[in-house]
Image (spheres, helix red, strand yellow):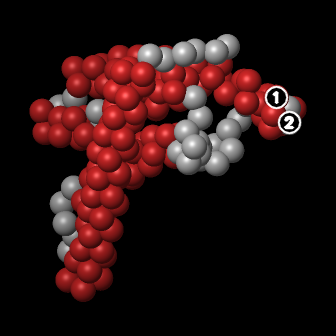
Amino acid sequence: MRTEVPHGLLVLLQAVRRGLTGLETLIAGLSLLLLVVLTLAQTVARNGFDTGLPAVDALARQLVLYVMFFGAALATDAARHIRIDVVSTWCDTSRLDRFYRPLQLVAAAVCALFTDAAVRFWLDAWQYAAQHDRWQVLLNLVIPVGFGLLAIHFLLGFLLGPSPRSAR
């Protein structure tokens, strides 16, 4: 399956890829930093002052999801994600190159299905969330956004082919 992308569109798609990875790096880094700071503050508050900071544990759980999804998107862009396809274990590298784009398209489709399911789940959670818990549900938007980003990265992989910096 050979897909030729016109030069103008190729430049645009590469710019989108660079922009996405820059934004994802920023969000993942800030989320990790905030997670470490909040966890340290909670530990000091509990051990040093026999108290705790309200909602830090719930926020820390959400931040783990942010780090995970944005880190997964970065790993996918660099082709450093976990591979569970059978084709890569059966084929040598030269033959595997022919399967790169179709596998990227299949992965994009699977992630798009997960995005749809996550959106429906999030809408249901929002509808039934208590008013004081809506902030947590709002933070859960990272799940459909994360799967959507993965779908976009796999779709970009399909359209652009393997990037020169990706290690297979």
Mark 1 is surrounded, within 10 Å at the Cα level, by few (under 14), some (14 to 19) or many (20 or more) other residues, namely few
Residue 107 in sight: no
In percent of width and height, residue 144 lies at 36, 28
Above-or-below relation of 168 to 85: below
Residue 8 drawn above or below residue 142 = above
Q: Toward which corner of the image does residue 88 lie, by quadrant?
A: top right
The CA span between labels 1 and 2 is 6 Å
Numbered label tally:
2
Q: Secondary structure at mark 1?
A: helix
* Residue placed most toward the observer, 23 or 110: 23
- The residue sitting at 22% across, 29% down in the picture is 129
Q: Which mark is residue 68?
A: none
Q: Which residue is mark 2?
A: 92
Front in this rendered view, residue 25 or 142: 25
- x then y, percent, for residue 159: 51, 22
Which residue occupies 33% across, 68% down? Answer: 36
- Asked if residue 142 lies left or right of residue 106, the reply is left
At a point 21% along the width and 56% down the height, the residue shown is: 55
- Residues 46 and 37: in front is 37
Question: Which amino acid, mark 2?
Answer: Asp
Residue 97, quarter of picture: top right
Examine the rendering and report whether any part of residue 97 can be seen: yes
Q: Are marks 1 and 2 in contact (CB under 8 Å)?
A: yes
Secondary structure found at label 2: loop
Q: Residue at x 48, y 17 (%)?
A: 5
Residue tagged 1:
95
Indicate whether 54 appears above or below 86: below
